[in-house]
Amino acid sequence: MFTKKLGVIGGLGPFATAYFFDLILKMTDAKADQEHLEMVIYNCPSIPDRTSHILGKSKNNPVIPMIEIGTKLVSLQVDYIAIPCITAHFYHSLLSQKLAVPIINMIQETARHLQNNNIEYVGLVATEGTVFSRIFQEELKFYKIRVIVPNRQGQDYINSIIYDNIKAGIKPELDKFQSVTQELKKHGAEVIIIGCTELSLIKRDYPIGAGYIDAMEVLAAQSILLCDTKLKKEFHCLISK
C-alpha cells in the first residue's frame, strides 16, 4: 500500500517527540506493519529553547536549526512535516516559506476540531512563549472561539510543571496542574486545550478527567489522515468525555 511520507522535526523536547511517535502508532488503524505510515524523525534536542527566544531572554534563534533539519527531511522526499512542539509554531510562517513541503499546523487543526465540535469557549494551558505570543489565541479568534488563559500564579505553575518537572524527568505536580485547569473551568471554559506537548504526557499518564483536548493528539490524527493512512474510529473526536 502506498502512503505519503511524514517528516518530523523532533527533540522539542525529546519526551514529547517519543510520545508523538507512540500516538501515531496507537491511532493508526493497521493490522500489519505495512499498513503504518512511513516516517522520518530527526530528533535534535540541541535546538535552542523557543520560549526564551520569543520572550527576548535569549538571542539563540531556534528557527535556524529547524530550517536545516527541515531541509534534510525534504531531501529525503517527505510529503509533510510535523513539529510536535506548539511553541515552535511561532515560526510556522517563516518555516513554511523556507521549506518546499507543507508543515502541518497543529494550532490551526486544533481550532478547526473545536469548531467542528461546536465549542465556543476554551481554556489554554501552554508555555509562557505560546501564551505571550498569542499564536493560539489569534487562531482561535479566527474561528470565533473565545479563550481564557491562567492568571500570573497559574502560568507560573504551568511553567514549573513543564520545565522543572516534565523536561527534567520528574513527576509533575498534578495538584498544581489541576488547580489551574479547574480555575479555567470555573470561569466558563467548556474544554481545556493542552497546548504544550510536554503537558500531553500528563493526559497520557494520569486520570485528569473529561473536558480536555490535546493538540498533540490532533497533530497525530491529522498526520495519519494527510499521509493517506487509516485513523482508528475512536480518534475521530479528540475531546475527552
Image (spheres, helix red, strand yellow):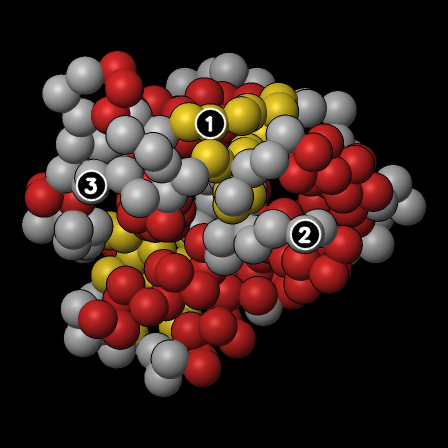
Image coordinates for residue 142, horizontal then vertical, percent: 45, 82
> In the structure shown, which secondary structural element does the residue marked by tag 2 occupy?
loop
* Circle 1: residue type: Met
Q: Residue at x 23, y 32 (%)?
A: 28
Image coordinates for residue 102, horizontal then vertical, percent: 56, 54
> In the structure shown, which secondary structural element does the residue marked by tag 3 occupy?
loop
Image coordinates for residue 50, horizontal then vertical, percent: 70, 44
* C-alpha gap between disc 3 and disc 2: 26 Å
> To which residue does mark 1 refer?
39
In the image, taking residue 221 as reference, residue 100 lies left or right, namely: right
> Camera-side residue: 103 or 4?
4
Task: Name the disc covering residue 231, or none.
Answer: 3
| Few, some or many residues within 10 Å of mark 3 (<14, 14–19, 20+) | many
In the image, taking residue 165 as reference, residue 124 lies left or right, namely: left
* Circle 2: residue type: Ala
Task: Mark yes or no: residue 172 visible.
Answer: no
Q: Residue at x 52, y 75 (%)?
A: 138
* C-alpha gap between disc 1 and disc 3: 16 Å
| Few, some or many residues within 10 Å of mark 1 (<14, 14–19, 20+) | some
Among numbered discs 2 and 1, the one appearing first in the sequence: 1
> Camera-side residue: 199 or 229?
229
Q: Say if mark 2 contacts mark 1, CB within 8 Å.
A: no
Q: Measured along the vertical axis of the image, is residue 41 above or below residue 62?
A: above
> To which residue does mark 2 refer?
100
Q: Residue at x 44, y 64 (%)?
A: 108
* Circle 3: residue type: Leu
Among numbered discs 3 and 2, the one appearing first in the sequence: 2
> Camera-side residue: 26 or 197?
26
